[in-house]
Image (cartoon, rainbow, N blue to C red):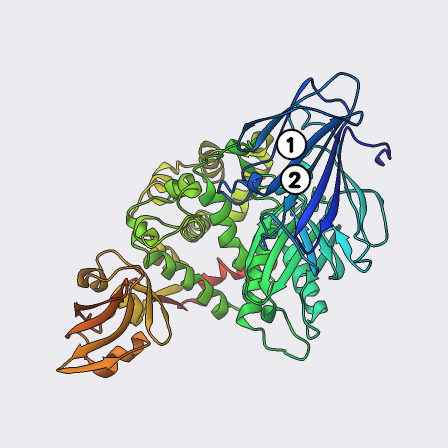
Amino acid sequence: MPHSTAPAPIHYQVALHDVHAHLFRVTLTVAQPARQQEASLPVWIPGSYLVREFAKNLHQLAAHQNGQPCAITQCDKHRWRMDCTDGAPLVLTYLVSAYDNSVRMAWLDQRRGFFNGTGLLLRIHNQEHLPHDLEVFQHENYPNWQLITALPAIKIEETGFGRYRARNYDELVDSPVEMGCFWHGRFTAGGVAHHFAVAGALATFDAERLLADTQKICAAQIQLWHPDGSTPEQQNYVFMLHATHDGYGGLEHRHSTALICNRADLPRHGVAQQAEGYTTLLGLISHEYFHTWNVKRLRPAAFAPYDYDRENYTELLWFFEGLTSYYDDLILHRTGLIDTPAYFKLLAKTINQVLQTPGRTVQSVAQASFDAWVKYYRQDENTANATVSYYTKGALVGLCLDLQLRREDSSLDALMRHLWQHCPDRQVTQERITASLHALTGRDWQAEIAAWVHGTGDLPLADLLAAFGVAVESQPAAPAQALGLRVQEGSSIAIHQVLRGSPAEQAGMMAGDEWYGIEAAGQSWRIGKLDELALYAPPGSAVTALVARDKQLLRLALQLPQAVEQPLSNVQLRTSDNTRLAQWLQATASV
């Protein structure tokens, strides 16, 4: 049904107040305020599990009724109360600083504008369920700017500026807005209209290739979730990609996604060979689009509804982020965008990331999910020793589930569809996951969930992969891995992390040290790369590392590791039986 053009009960007007000062101006009209009307700005944005305190960017809040000021009381860090009278609309005005050039908050300069509603649009308490209008004004100094958002339009200009409507506050703040001079393309997949906006691209950008490849990804995922040909719920989907000099990231939304990539990773005219960076970009697109189902519609019961005032805890991020991470590259293989060797290289990279993280023996992937608010988004020099990523280990749990299910004549695809079709209100709990696993296989899966999700032992990757014709082969450790270091190399070696139980830790190295050289066999040598160690000292020898800490030079006794392979700490994957491999990969290569 068409939307009414009459103003919604909650109406936001957003103006580019001062582009050079990076300020948005918001005018919020509440048609029927309560006498003690409260309003607040969310402290986090769904999909990024960290309290980010968006209210720190809000300034000069004022309230009026009938042109007269209303008293405002600040209740806490992000919530205000207005004293109102009956029968008159409440008008709030405020400024928001927009300096965050990420997918999470807001940005404004003379080249581009972007915002998420969680960082810009106050929530009117007890009226969140009502329709909300968003009206964005074009700046007179930027007449060539365009605007794109997934919100339904009520009355807009050809440029996209104008008035849009959300069914409620949740839909409003789940619909980011992109503004500026961007390239815009369209395609259809599964009967759904898709839009793709790219800001910051160079003249060499091959837009048609990006559109064609993205269409393949979207069509494959729609087919995965809707094999019966049913119509997806997203009838209009928007990709917003910001190409920068050095950036990467994405954030999912119900009808759109915001993405950032290195502009050098975009496909280029006349370059047939697919660059590694472009494969990474396609994986990011695949990941965020998969979230259209897995977390935005099929979501943790703890997120129904979202609580914008505080952390929303769940132990299921391994499922929603981890399994999505398993599928993102798998979809690229299914669509032919990467071949099997390329897929194995990406999968081996994920396996190595987990195996080379000492924290995998300390923290379960369920604990990592629950602790995301204080650990995953606040990484430090000890993160690798105390935590495991619910993205990477969660992806490997997804791999194990898929392979074991296939051994029992089912698949992870079937599990996802079963949850989609049978979860009440599409709210997922661990109990509903295990119930679906039982329904598909006729047996109990508590032992696997206990070991793989709640345990800290290594996953049975080698055995499960071998059952499908894939050999897991150990490789010699790289110098940084053998020493137990994560570094940045240059004129010296900047140490960022020292891994637990490693030769570097035993020598007394720590994060923040600068490693300048070594003393070996009575000689001193300057080094800038760890590979150079082999030039001056044989494996297994004792040397003195010359490091600087807090400007003080230290001499640390270091025992170099032996040049031996470390089983299952640095691996590569190799096909050993194409027939069995087909039962996993090729059986679903054409979905």
Crowd tier of the residue under label 1, counting other residues whose Cα lies within 10 Å: few below 14, some 14–19, many 20 or above: many
At horizontal 71% and vertical 58% (from top left) the residue drawn is 196
Does residue 410 appear in the picture of this structure? no
Q: Position of residue 338 (x, y in %)?
A: 55, 67
Compared to residue 509, the image places residue 225 above or below, namely above
Secondary structure beneath dot 2 equals: helix
Secondary structure beneath dot 1 equals: strand
Residue type at numbered disc 1:
Arg
Question: Which residue is most to the front?
Answer: 68
- Nearest to N terminus: mark 2 or mark 1: 1
Q: Is residue 476 left or right of residue 233?
A: left
Residue type at numbered disc 2:
Val
Camera-side residue: 104 or 67? 67
Picture quadrant where residue 318 is located: top left
Compared to residue 533, the image places residue 1 above or below, namely above
Q: Position of residue 576 (x, y in %)?
A: 39, 68
**Callout 2 touching callout 1 (CB < 8 Å):** yes
For the N terminus, the quadrant is top right
Instruction: Please name which of the two marks, 2 or 1, marks the residue nearer to the observer.
Output: 1
Label annotation for residue 173: 2
Crowd tier of the residue under label 2, counting other residues whose Cα lies within 10 Å: few below 14, some 14–19, many 20 or above: many
Compared to residue 254, the image places residue 424 above or below, namely above
For the C terminus, the quadrant is bottom right
Camera-side residue: 369 or 21? 21
Does residue 158 appear in the picture of this structure? yes
Q: Is residue 507 left or right of residue 269?
A: left
Residue under pointer 1: 123
Q: Position of residue 9 (x, y in %)?
A: 77, 28
